Every structure is written in structure tokens, then in C-alpha cells.
Image (cartoon, rainbow, N blue to C red):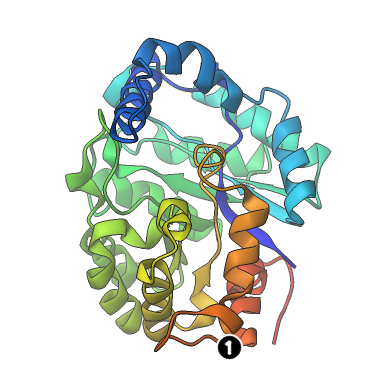
Amino acid sequence: MIVDAHTHVVVEKHYPAAWWDGLAELFSRHFQMAGREVSADTVRQKILPTFYDPEGERLLGNMDEAGIDVSVLLPLDYGLALGDPAESLADQCRWLGGLQEKHPKRLVAFTTVDPRRRGSAEFVRRSVEEWGLRGLKLHPAAGFFPNSRETYRVMEVAAECKLAVVVHTGQIVYPLKSRFCDPIYLDDLLVDFPDLKIQAAHLAFGWRDQLNHMGATKPNLFTDFAGWQRSVAAGSEYFPRALREALDHFGPQRVFFGTDGPYLRGVMKEADFIRLVRELPARAPAGISFQEDEIRWVLGDAAANFLGLLDVG
């Protein structure tokens, strides 16, 4: 089984305009660093629309092409930081629940909410009871700390409903703020909610060494390497070494494959990402080794077990 444990189905009206503007500026700078003059306006008008997927059809097509059995859909609430988008958070989450219901064997949809919103804990409960959503995604870069009093109220509901929780960790693009995303702020939650399973996204990017040590000491902490395609595409030993270190600290049952799709599809297609991970036991750089069984866990069995999709031994 192949599970994409961290992806998105992107609808333009689900995100604030400031998010799209910031992303356009980022892409424009990357093009310039590569020697191509592509303006932010060009990115905004011609490139970003290729991400939009209002019916989920692009996502499902890419899953089929890559051989991905299940994708975990993570919505995002940037509204308090960047301004609310055109479509309400309730409508977004209701829509995701409907998409999951339409493709129950392929899609697992999470809810999201900024804990500082009035009624945030009740919103999470409603997401589960009314819309059938199966996990909670939090994005602290919107301006809150994961160990804040507001977050604890939301986590109490997540624990009561036995939800899987994904929290963004690591640096984040402008105009969001990275300082809220240091994985150390998960430590309080991991101790105070020992039965809650928390997935720290992205190997925490630049904070991965700290995350690894937390993974070795907190058994309810999990991680994914979504968003690492640039490092994979570079062909150096940086990604294999990062993955090896994560496996050594967490164990293969707590490290998940993810794409952060669709944003990095232009860097590396999902099928190529999976192929390169799958080939690591045979083609890892000198001095780094992987076992076939480890890669089986990483590519799907670990996330499937985390989500309760199947029992694996």
C-alpha cells in the first residue's frame, strides 16, 4: 500500500489572496535564481491556476499515475493571519467531507481550525460528527503556539474523538511566520496527551535534528517528509541521510511518505518521488543503507497503521 500522508486538494477560494500573492513572489524568486525572468504577476495568472482542483479530479488522476492508494487531505486555516478567504472554513470542511464520502477508499480528509477562533473546539467536534472528518491539521505559522491555552482546548476534543493530528513544523514561506513552528512546542502536548498521536510535518525542515531527538524520546510523535522533493531532485546524499537519521530516531513505523502536493509537482512528479524512495535500498549513497522492510513501512504501512486503515505487523 502507498499512502501520501500529507497532501492538499487546492481550491482558489479556500485560501486568502495574500497567500497566493506571497506564493507568487516566492516562485518568481526561485525562477530568477535559476536564471529565468518570470514575474510574480505571471506566476499568479499562469502557473498557480495549474494547482487549482475544484473537483479533486487532478488529485485522483495523479494518484492513479503514481500508484498511490490513499491520500490524506489537509486543509489550512490562514484566515486570522492573512484575511479570511472567499469560502468559509465550515464550507471548506463540509466539501472535504463530501469528497471523502465520494471516494472512501482513496481519500482521508482532515479538518482544520486556528485555535484562536471563537468556538474552535466546537468546530472540531462538528467536523467529526457532522462531516465525518477523520483528523485535525494545525498550522501554527498563522500566529499561534502549539502549546498555547487555546490549542489545548482544541486538543482536548481531538483526544476525546481519537483524531490523528498533523502539525506543521519547520520553516514556512512568506508571509507566514516560522517562529511558531519549532517542534519543541509540541513537547508539552506529547506529554500532556500521551494517547494522542501527533504527526510533525516535513521532518521540521531546518529543525530536524531537534525533531529527531524528540522522536527518540516521545513514542506518540510521528513525522513525514512531505516537501523534500527539491533535496531529492538534487541527487546529493542530503535527503537519504536525513531520512536515515529520522528512521534511526523514530523507527520506520513512525516516519511517513508525503508529497505536500500539488505545490512541488513541477519539481518532481509523485511517481518519480516514490520510485526514488523505493530504490534507496539498492541505490543509497555510500555509507548509508536502507532495508526493504523499512521502505515498505515508510511508503505506506506506517501511515496506514497511524490512520487505522489496516493492522500491519
User: In which quadrant of the rendered image does the N terminus lie?
Assistant: bottom right
Q: Nearer the viewer, residue 245 or 137?
A: 245
Q: Secondary structure at mark 1?
A: loop
Instruction: Residue at 24%, 62% (x, y): give it.
Output: 207
Instruction: Residue at 50%, 79% (x, y): give it.
Output: 284
Residue 87 in view: no
Q: Nearer the viewer, residue 112 or 201?
A: 201
Badge 1 is on which residue?
A: 291
Amino acid type at circle 1 is Gln
Q: With 144 as the anchor, is 270 left or right in this view?
A: right
Q: Is residue 229 above or below residue 77?
A: below
Can you give x and y, in whole percent of width and height, for residue 226 in the image? 48, 55
Q: Nearer the viewer, residue 138 or 170?
A: 170
User: In which quadrant of the rendered image does the C terminus lie?
Assistant: bottom right
Can you give x and y, in whole percent of width and height, for residue 126 in the image? 57, 37
Can you give x and y, in whole percent of width and height, for residue 56 in the image? 71, 31
Badge count: 1
Q: Residues within 10 Å of mark 1 (few under 14, many from 20)?
A: few
> Residue 272 occupies which quadrant of the picture?
bottom right
> Residue 212 occupies which quadrant of the picture?
bottom left
Can you give x and y, in whole percent of width and height, for residue 69 in the image? 76, 57
> Residue 220 occupies which quadrant of the picture?
bottom left
